[in-house]
Amino acid sequence: MSSDPYDYSLSEPDKPAKAIESGLYIVATPIGNLADMSQRAVDMLRAADLVAVEDSRVTGKLLHHLGLKKRMRPYHDHSSEADRDALLAAAREGVVVLVSDAGTPLISDPGYKLVRAAREAGIPVSTAPGPSAAITALSISGLPTDRFLFAGFLPSKAKARADAITEFADVKTTLLFYESGPRLAATLATLAEMLGPREAAVARELTKKFEEVVSGTLPELAERYAGAEPRGEIVLIVGPPVEVQAEQGDYESALKIALETLPPAKAAKDIAKRFGVDRAEVYERAMGLKAKE
Ligand code: SAM
């Protein structure tokens, strides 16, 4: 067996692409720089009998740039079962490629139900892997990469958002969130309040002209972006919990937030763990706060 880990058969631009068998192909597209389109991704699009897309205008531009004209069909996870069945029928007979507007399909993008249904139906599923904003951001953030949790977009409603953050607070890994400019300041403020002074980074416009990664603790970043509405696309990376031996006063605001969504015993358990303080003491404080309500 060759020690070469690569199969070059599809990646030589001057040779005709190897025939692609019928099935469903999950094809990643660039997240900002067209030069990140892989040769295999181009080959699969060239071989496609049908391209399932989020937005035909966005994918139409990409196809045009590649000199390809293809039949497109919209697909979202809320598409009907009949729509999914039509794509599966096409994938039995020919090459169906799924792309999203940018990056890797299924990662905070449509495709999960389609891939699941294709696998259940015994239809071959393969991929041309490529850029994804989460991994791109993590790889240049300077934050721990050994274990991470991809959390997608946080809910926009305050209570649901606080519940989600409470859920992630105990996870001892780096956390990755997708975020938008208009929501960044509020998200950073809530994260700073609920997770304390963890290291974090705001990665913006990755692979584009104005790419930047701004690092700092959550409170520092919350202050820096307060009132600001940075342009472009953003990934927020939050490092694992720091072991903080806080003064009693420091955990009180976090406890108040926890009490909005949790019963006192659970809130006390979470806060005691996060701040490294005695659980009974935090519980007593929680009951005091409840009594004042
Ligand atoms: N499937 C895509 C992927 O693999 O990255 C993500 C799709 S999700 C709907 C779009 C979000 O990804 C944006 O709101 C932003 O948070 C993040 N994103 C996409 N492109 C980005 C970029 N160039 N720089 C920073 N974040 C980006």
Image (cartoon, grey):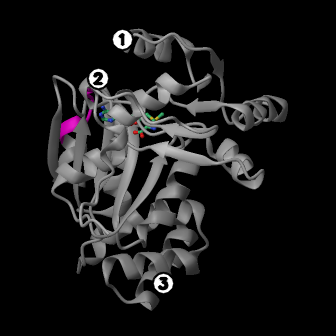
Taking the spot 51% from the left edge, 41% from the top edge, the residue there is 108
Q: Which amino acid lies under the numbered mark 2 shown in the image of this protein?
A: Leu
Q: Any mark on residue 65, and which? A: 1
Q: Which amino acid lies under the numbered mark 1 shown in the image of this protein?
A: His
Q: Is residue 171 visible?
A: yes
Say whether marks 2 and 1 touch (CB < 8 Å).
yes
Front-most of residues 196 and 63: 63
- Disc 1 packing (10 Å; few <14; some 14–19; many ≥20): few
- Disc 2 packing (10 Å; few <14; some 14–19; many ≥20): some
Q: Can residue 107 be seen in this view?
A: no
Taking the spot 57% from the left edge, 32% from the top edge, the residue there is 98
* Pointer 1 or 3: first along the chain: 1
For mark 3, what is the residue? 284
* Bounds of the magenta segment: 224-230
Q: Is residue 236 above or below residue 40?
A: below
* Pointer 2 or 1: first along the chain: 2
> Residue 48, image x and y in percent?
56, 25
Question: Is residue 227 on the magenta stretch?
Answer: yes
The secondary structure that dominates the magenta segment is loop
